[in-house]
């Protein structure tokens, strides 16, 4: 294992949703990457999802820009969650950029779908880990969105923020810059 002491396997996940309340809103895109302890991508998953009958907040829809017609014709969320479950080989640690939002939505979606939540253990909070590294270095930075950290590490920004897989891959690059020797 490298000096980074990261877990052997992590499942880096990001979602896009129809709003901010997992009890009322639903997931419209899931992006995931299985990575090793060197944060090398082993495989990725990316799917738009039809969350079924949920509330839609126009402000949330404006953030990710996924058209409603693409959501209504997307794969049912239950099918995507089943794919995600099979994608989770070797019981990886769930990793997200600010896990409370993503994990809460995923937990509720699994519950609604009648599927078992496959990652019922601790979550690696990439945002807090990266922010902690910057703080330890004495670098002042506001705790903010992924784009702030891309700038802080002089990384090439993705073509689009708020695309689930793009944000997953960007999270991995930010973690590499901050956490690996």
Image (cartoon, rainbow, N blue to C red):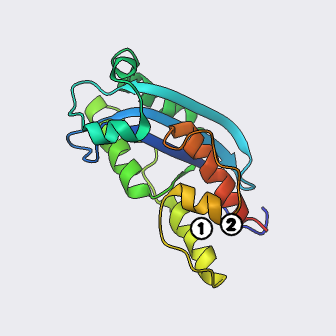
Kindly report the distance in space between the C-alpha atoms of the residues bearing marks 2 and 1.
Answer: 6 Å
Q: Which mark is residue 157?
A: none
User: Is 46 in front, or is 88?
Assistant: 46
Give the percent coordinates (x, y) of residue 127. 52, 63
**Side (left or right) of 167 relative to 152:** left
Residue 169 visible somewhere in the drawing: yes
Tag 2 secondary structure:
helix
- Who's the residue at 21% across and 25% down the image? 53
Q: Which mark is residue 130?
A: 1
Q: What is the crowding at mark 2: few (fewer than 14 residues within 10 Å), some, or many (at least 20)?
A: some
| Image height of 118 relative to 4, above or below | above
User: Which quarter of the figure is the N terminus placed in?
Assistant: bottom right
- Who's the residue at 47% across and 64% down the image? 144
**Side (left or right) of 85 relative to 129:** left
- Who's the residue at 41% across and 22% down the image? 79
Instruction: Mark 2 or mark 1: name the one nearer the start of the chain.
Output: 1
| Image height of 70 relative to 152, above or below | above
- Who's the residue at 26% across and 33% down the image? 112
Q: Which mark is residue 178?
A: 2
Q: Do labels 2 and 1 touch, CB within 8 Å?
A: yes
User: Which quarter of the figure is the C terminus placed in?
Assistant: bottom right
Q: Quadrant of residue 22?
A: top left
User: Is 155 in front, or is 37?
Assistant: 155
Tag 1 secondary structure:
helix
Q: What is the crowding at mark 1: few (fewer than 14 residues within 10 Å), some, or many (at least 20)?
A: many
């Amino acid at each position: 294992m490298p000096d980074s002491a990261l877990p052997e396997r992590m499942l880096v996940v990001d979602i896009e949703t129809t709003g901010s309340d997992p009890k009322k809103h639903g997931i419209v895109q899931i992006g995931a990457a299985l990575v090793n302890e060197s944060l090398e991508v082993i495989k990725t998953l990316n799917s738009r999802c039809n969350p079924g009958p949920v509330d839609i907040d126009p402000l949330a829809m404006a953030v990710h820009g996924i058209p409603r017609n693409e959501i209504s014709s997307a794969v049912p969320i239950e099918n995507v969650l089943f794919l995600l479950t099979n994608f989770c080989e070797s019981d990886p640690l769930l990793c997200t950029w600010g896990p409370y939002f993503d994990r809460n939505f995923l937990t509720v979606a699994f519950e609604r779908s009648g599927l078992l939540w496959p990652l019922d253990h601790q979550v690696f909070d990439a945002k807090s880990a990266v922010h902690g590294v910057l703080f330890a270095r004495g670098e002042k930075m506001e705790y903010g969105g992924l784009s702030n950290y891309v700038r802080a590490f002089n990384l090439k920004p993705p073509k689009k923020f708020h695309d689930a897989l793009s944000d997953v891959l960007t999270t991995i690059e930010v973690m590499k810059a901050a956490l690996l020797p």
